Image (cartoon, rainbow, N blue to C red):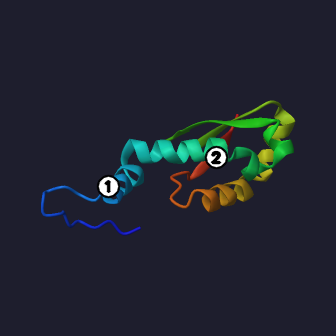
């Protein structure tokens, strides 16, 4: 989405320009991505996997995922790149560079 920098004659900006800026940058934009990740987690990893793990937080480009057992942690570690790819597909502007299972 291209944001127009033009203002109307009365000094106001079109609402779609303001919303685009707010959602696309800064803390609110990151919060929207986090919410989208959390709400789409079952679609990303699948029902069975989602029963054994859940995203905790995103910090410094790392997604921390809580896993309910060492066996699942090992399995998910093998699937890390596939999961990262699915996250990137779902969140086109994802800031996630690494996934940490714990």
Q: Earlier in the sequence, mark 1 or mark 2?
A: 1
Q: Is residue 16 above or below residue 36?
A: below
Q: Nearer the viewer, residue 49 or 43?
A: 43
Count all numbered tags in the image, as a single digit. Answer: 2
**Figure quadrant of the N terminus:** bottom left
Residue at x 28% of width, y 67% of height: 4
What is the secondary structure assignment of the residue under circle 2?
strand
At horizontal 36% and vertical 52% (from top left) the residue drawn is 19
Residue under the image location 64 percent in, 55 percent down: 87
Q: Looking at the rendering, which quadrant does residue 7 occupy?
A: bottom left
SS for tag 1?
helix
Q: Position of residue 46 (x, y in %)?
A: 81, 49
| Front residue of this view, candidates 89 and 63 | 89
In the drawing, does residue 15 fall left or right of residue 40?
Answer: left
Q: Residue furthest top?
A: 68
**Residue 15: x, y in percent?**
32, 55
Q: Nearer the viewer, residue 83 or 20?
A: 20
Residue 91: which disc? none
Which residue is labeled 2 in the image? 99
Packing grade of label 2 (10 A; few <14, some 14-19, many >=20) is some
Q: Which residue is mark 1?
A: 15
Q: Is residue 100 visible?
A: yes
Quadrant showing the C terminus? top right
Find the distance from the CA under tag 1 to the CA under tag 2.
36 Å
Tell me if I can see residue 61 in this picture: no
Report x, y in % for residue 82: 74, 58
The mark closer to the camera, 1 or 2, is 1
Can you say whether 1 is above or below 38 in the image?
below
């Amino acid at each position: 989405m291209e944001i127009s920098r033009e203002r109307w004659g009365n000094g106001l900006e079109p609402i779609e320009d303001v919303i685009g800026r707010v959602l696309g940058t800064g803390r609110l934009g990151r919060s929207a991505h986090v919410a989208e990740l959390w709400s789409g987690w079952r679609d990303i990893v699948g029902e069975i996997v989602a029963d054994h793990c859940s995203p905790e937080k995103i910090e410094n480009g790392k997604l921390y995922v809580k896993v309910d057992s060492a066996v699942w942690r090992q399995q998910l570690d093998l699937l890390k790149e596939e999961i990262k790819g699915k996250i990137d597909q779902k969140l086109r502007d994802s800031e996630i560079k690494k996934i940490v299972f714990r």
